Amino acid sequence: MGQMLKCVSPIDGSVFAEREVLSQEAAFEVAARARAAQVDWAARPLQERIDLVMAGVAAVGAMNDEIVPELAHMMGRPVRYGGEFGGFNERASHMAEIAEASLADIAVGEDETFKRYIKRIPHGVVFVVAPWNYPYMTAINTVAPALIAGNTVVLKHATQTLLVGERMARAFHAAGVPEDVFQNVFLNHDVTSDLIAGNAFDFVNFTGSVGGGQAMERAAAGTFTGVGTELGGKDPGYVMDDADLDAAVETLIDGAMFNSGQCCCGIERIYVHESLYDAFVAKAVEVVKGYKLGNPLDTETTIGPMANVRFADEVRAQIAEAVEAGAVAHIDTFAEDDGGAYLTPQILTDVTHDMRVMRDESFGPVVGIMKVSSDDEAIALMNDSEFGLTASLWTREVDRAARVGDAIETGTVFMNRADYLDPGLCWTGCKNTGRGGGLSIIGYHNLTRPKSYHLKKVTG
């Protein structure tokens, strides 16, 4: 038997699932089958591809009663929240609805002499490397539009959510998507790199760590394979002096703590105007003290364990370093905090940007809150980061939010909301958060290439 991938459940540290990785030879055979199947798949009518993909999405939904506890076992999200099918279906449905317009030929001009237009052509074989924190929703962001556009897809999921790709492939195949058109694989890092370096794929979409994204780009170097990445984040919230305080507290603290803080666009640092600062902190502490940490299979649990002990260890280290440097921790250790994956959610004040908790990605249930006196001060602090995914602005003035948003180095600007992915908008980042863009019409453009037609007519 070859190398095994093991999903260790954060609930109790037991091995929940394991799968054998493909050999290099077998992995290249998967890619070859995907390439062979792509021409016939792309030749199918667009509406047929849409219908098959949406049937696959529905088949995933039919598994939801099994998926929800399975996710709790694999990555610790409490069952009370019901899984990911709502967002999974919303994103796929939107991409299905806009497919015809997004993939339509672009007419440039036609007269008695010339016809000119631009077509959108599928890349060919798209490799999707998906993360564990929202394993279904992050995968469908690319899987659905890639298949609809006429690409074949090879999906590799994170070891922490080992069974997700298997379930998705099973559902899509049962709905009629050919097996070679959508394949799930189990790979180690070396074979993954070999596939990319060996031109097995025509486009790579990776969601994960900065280091992982760098590895993808290194593997693709010199191959001219396109690589789209969504990497780290340190997303800020800014509460202005005219904000709805209660709404800001409720949304930003939920954005910081939901899913045990393990959200790509989770709120990791908050800046509050000095006139609202004390009230904001008091209300935020009250909210977090009301959380129930525990087994995610218990319907009373509101915050489960982090997905892996090593993730919790990093958050504890950031908190301890900050406190040692003068930060104030407002939440006493919960009785259920076991020093391992079960971690007390924490609010820190008296923090500075000299502390790692305000600079490095935490990806856990901790948030630092700082007082500011002006928009300019808040903008400077929000931009003082190597990352740029989203920012959440709280004000009653749309023009003010737009003006501040224009000055922020980020991929998405929210006003009076946070931690949400609108499939009508491009999901993108800047700086060390990565390059590329998913969903929206731009998502289709990134999963296809332009092909220009300049046709001269015979007129005599």
Image (cartoon, helix red, strand yellow):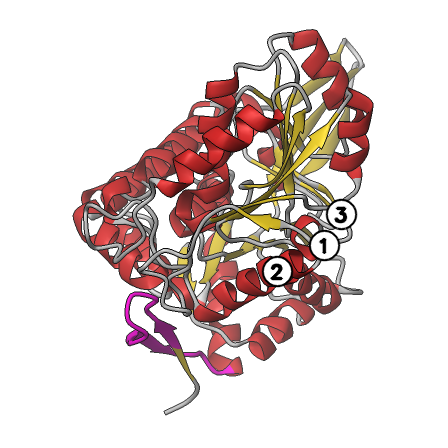
Mark toward the start of the polypeptide (2 vs 3): 2
Give the residue at x 46% y 48%: 331
Residue 167: where, in percent of width, then height? 29, 57
Q: Which mark is residue 318?
A: 2
Determine if residue 457 is in view. no
- Distance, label 3 to label 1, CA atoms, is 5 Å
Front-lying residue, 255 or 170: 255
Quadrant of the snapshot with the C terminus: top right
**Mark 2 in CB contact with mark 1 (< 8 angstroms):** yes
Query: Which residue is label 1 attached to?
Result: 355
- Distance, label 2 to label 3, CA atoms, is 12 Å
Q: Which mark is residue 353?
A: 3
- Distance, label 2 to label 1, CA atoms, is 8 Å
Residue 44 as seen in the image, left or right of residue 188: left
Amino acid residing under circle 2: Gln
Give the residue at x 72% y 62%: 217
Tell me the SS state at disc 1: loop
Amino acid residing under circle 1: Met
Q: Range of the magenta residues?
A: 6-23
